[in-house]
Image (spheres, rainbow, N blue to C red):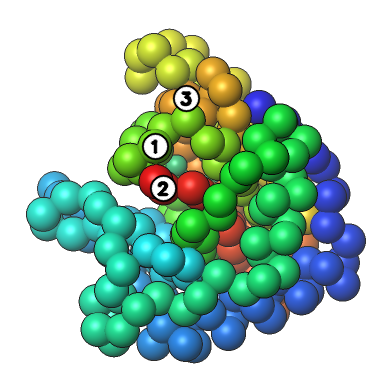
Amino acid sequence: MLHLKNYFNESEQQALVELTRNIAKTNGGMTIPVMPTGSKFNCSQTSCGLVGWLSDRHGYRYSKINPQNNQPFAAMPAELVEIAQHLAKLVDEPNYQPETCLINFYAAERKSKMGLHQDNTERNLIPCIISISLGDDCIFSIGSNRSRKDPVTDITLRSGDVLILHGETRLAYHAVKKIVPGTSPLLKNNGRLNLTIRQVY
Ligand code: MD3
Ligand code: FE
């Protein structure tokens, strides 16, 4: 795992927020998905790129069509492709193909969080996952890739931080424990935005 603290400066962070707003607009907004169990996620989501990540009663999967508007997802902005390919080179993945970016928004003052899970919906589980944090601080837990019962380590992800999950940590169990409201001035009504870039195939 590679944690690049404050990788993006304030104006770059602002540009990433703007880019995210445009994607959400093109996609017809963000949605709060349901899990296969029927319970709702504690964050809202949308995707851009070749495919988007979906969760519903039938399970987790990638789709070329956004059920929100029955259209393809917004294209991955060229800036994001460049950022991802540059970052992937730092972990020795020069052929990285950023095929999708999942946008998670965690509202402040709500019990916004994400339970312990592995990211294993991708067909190819080898390429790294790149996460960009914007807005309020988040307490993030990361465990092992062997058992969800293994001990976790808590780290703080702050606005502008990048986390690259590669090698062993690609399949580590992880969770968003909590958002700390009011810790960043970036978003008007606080909360946290996370961009998770993945190669799927
Ligand atoms: C550690 N999102 O969407 S990003 C997810 O902050 C997800 O929105 C969180 O977990 C969020 O699946 C965490 C950081 C992250 C992403 C993928 C990982 C950490 C990871 C994969 C393996 C280990
Ligand atoms: Fe995850």
Looking at numbered disc 2 in the image, what kind of residue is underneath it?
Val
> Which residue is label 3 attached to?
172
Q: Is residue 106 above or below residue 20?
A: above
On residue 110, which mark appears?
none
User: Of marks 3 and 1, which one's residue comes earlier in the chain?
Assistant: 1
Circles 1 and 2, Cβ within 8 Å, touching? The answer is yes
The residue depicted at 56 percent of the width and 54 percent of the height is 98
Q: Which mark is nearer the camera, 3 or 2?
A: 2
Q: Is residue 35 above or below residue 70?
A: above
- Image position, residue 20 (x, y; %): 60, 75
- Image position, residue 112 (x, y; %): 46, 55
Is the CB of mark 3 within 8 Å of ligand 1?
yes
Label 2: how many residues lie within 10 Å, few (<14), some (14-19) or many (20+)?
Answer: many
Say which of 104 and 111 sits in front: 104
Residue 186 in sight = no
- Image position, residue 47 (x, y; %): 44, 67
On residue 200, which mark appears?
2
Q: CA distance from mark 3 to mark 1?
A: 15 Å
On residue 124, which mark appears?
1
Circles 3 and 1, Cβ within 8 Å, touching? The answer is no
* Quadrant where the N terminus is found in the figure: top right
* 174 lies left or right of 55: right
User: Of marks 3 and 2, which one's residue comes earlier in the chain?
Assistant: 3
Task: Classify mark 3: helix, strand or loop.
Answer: loop
Looking at numbered disc 3 in the image, what kind of residue is underneath it?
Ala
Residue 59 in sight = yes
Q: Is residue 32 above or below residue 170?
A: below
User: Of marks 1 and 2, which one's residue comes earlier in the chain?
Assistant: 1
Task: Classify mark 1: helix, strand or loop.
Answer: loop
